[in-house]
Amino acid sequence: MLIIAGTPNIVRGESHTGNVSAAELVSAGLTDALASDYIPTSMLPAILRLVRDGVAALPQAVRLVTSGAAACVGLDDRGSLVEGLRADLVLADFSKSWPSALAFTSRAMDDE
């Protein structure tokens, strides 16, 4: 069974309904992916919080929202920067407490 935890939970530092802390799940190695269904802008801040709190290294935190999320929903044609796979790249500014995307590009496998 794959485990997906919510990025708003990580940003808040706790569940808003009293459930388990997503950061604790990540710290214990029990999380396959991070996602958000109601605050998609929490993805970058969650990565930053995990890194700043010492819960995960940057590559591990990024994998949770990229290749981990893709694997959880069966999208094996994306999620990693590998030749031949679809690629969505984001240039992010992590210098503030709430990171922001500065640029975005997407490239399909058949783009030349």
Image (spheres, rainbow, N blue to C red):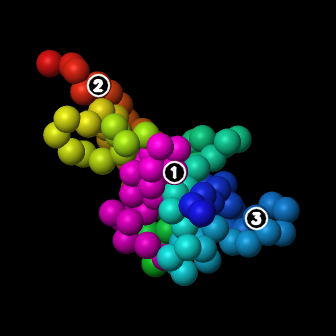
Assess disc 3: are there few (<14), some (14-19) or many (≥20) residues with their C-alpha within 10 Å of its C-alpha.
some
Tell me which numbered mark, 3 or 2, is placed earlier along the sequence.
3
Name which residue type carries label 2.
Answer: Ala
Residue 106 position within the rendered picture, expressed as x and y whole percent measured from the top left? 32, 27
Say which quarter of the image contains residue 108: top left
Q: Quadrant of the C terminus?
A: top left
Location of mark 1 (residue): 72
Say which quarter of the image contains residue 68: bottom left
Q: Residue at x 26, y 36 (%)?
A: 85
The disc at residue 108 is 2
Q: Could you tell whether 47 is left or right of 2 in the image?
A: left
Q: Which residues are magenta?
A: 55-74
Tell me which numbered mark, 3 or 1, is placed earlier along the sequence.
3
Task: Give above or below for 86 relative to 62.
Answer: above
Q: Residue at x 43, y 73 (%)?
A: 56
Mark 3 or 2, closer to the camera:
2
Assess disc 2: are there few (<14), some (14-19) or many (≥20) residues with their C-alpha within 10 Å of its C-alpha.
few
Location of mark 3 (residue): 15
Residue 64 position within the rendered picture, expressed as x and y whole percent measured from the top left? 46, 58
Q: Could you tell whether 2 is left or right of 86 in the image?
A: right
Task: Give above or below for 36 relative to 19.
Answer: above
Q: Residue at x 37, y 71 (%)?
A: 57
Taking the magenta stretch, the answer to whether it contains residue 60 is yes
Assess disc 1: are there few (<14), some (14-19) or many (≥20) residues with their C-alpha within 10 Å of its C-alpha.
some
